[in-house]
């Protein structure tokens, strides 16, 4: 499991750092993200759903937020046909 501490960072920096890390990992690999930005409560689940990653666990311990995320499969590139 990879740890990513984004404490002290504010939107959009935590999600950008998470995205950058997940892009380097193989499908199924896990990341534990911790931070203190209240926006993460909404941003992490939304990002995971949009990008095809799986949110395994989310926890709020007095303002310290922790998430466990599994890297999703590599999405195929979409081709727009008119």
Image (cartoon, rainbow, N blue to C red):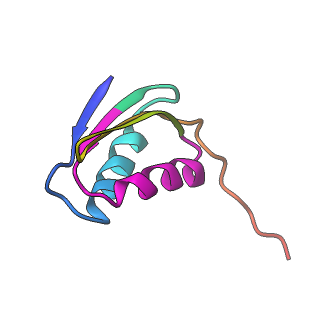
Q: Outermost residue toward the top?
A: 1
Q: Nearer the viewer, residue 79 or 13?
A: 13
Q: Give the residue at x 59% y 36%.
A: 73
Image-based side of 77 in relation to 7, left or right: right
Q: For residue 51: magenta? A: yes
Q: Nearer the viewer, residue 79 or 49?
A: 49
Which residues are drawn in magenta? 32-53
Q: Outermost residue toward the left?
A: 8
Rendered-image quadrant of the N terminus: top left
Q: Give the residue at x 23% y 43%.
A: 62
Rendered-image quadrant of the C terminus: bottom right
Residue 69, position in %: x, y? 44, 35
41 in relation to 22, above or below: below
Q: Give the residue at x 49% y 54%.
A: 47
Image-based side of 38 in relation to 42, left or right: left
Q: Give the residue at x 58% y 49%.
A: 49
44 in relation to 73, above or below: below
Residue 66, position in %: x, y? 31, 37
The quarter of the picture where residue 53 lies is top right
Q: For residue 7: magenta? A: no
78 in relation to 20, above or below: below
Q: Nearer the viewer, residue 55 or 80?
A: 55
């Amino acid at each position: 499991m990879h740890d990513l501490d984004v404490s002290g960072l504010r939107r959009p920096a935590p999600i950008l750092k998470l995205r950058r890390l997940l892009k380097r990992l193989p499908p199924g690999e896990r990341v534990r993200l911790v931070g203190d930005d209240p926006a993460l409560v909404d941003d992490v689940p939304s990002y995971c759903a949009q990008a095809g990653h799986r949110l395994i666990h989310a926890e709020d311990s007095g303002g310290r937020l922790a998430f466990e995320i599994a890297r999703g499969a590599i999405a195929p590139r979409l081709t727009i046909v008119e």
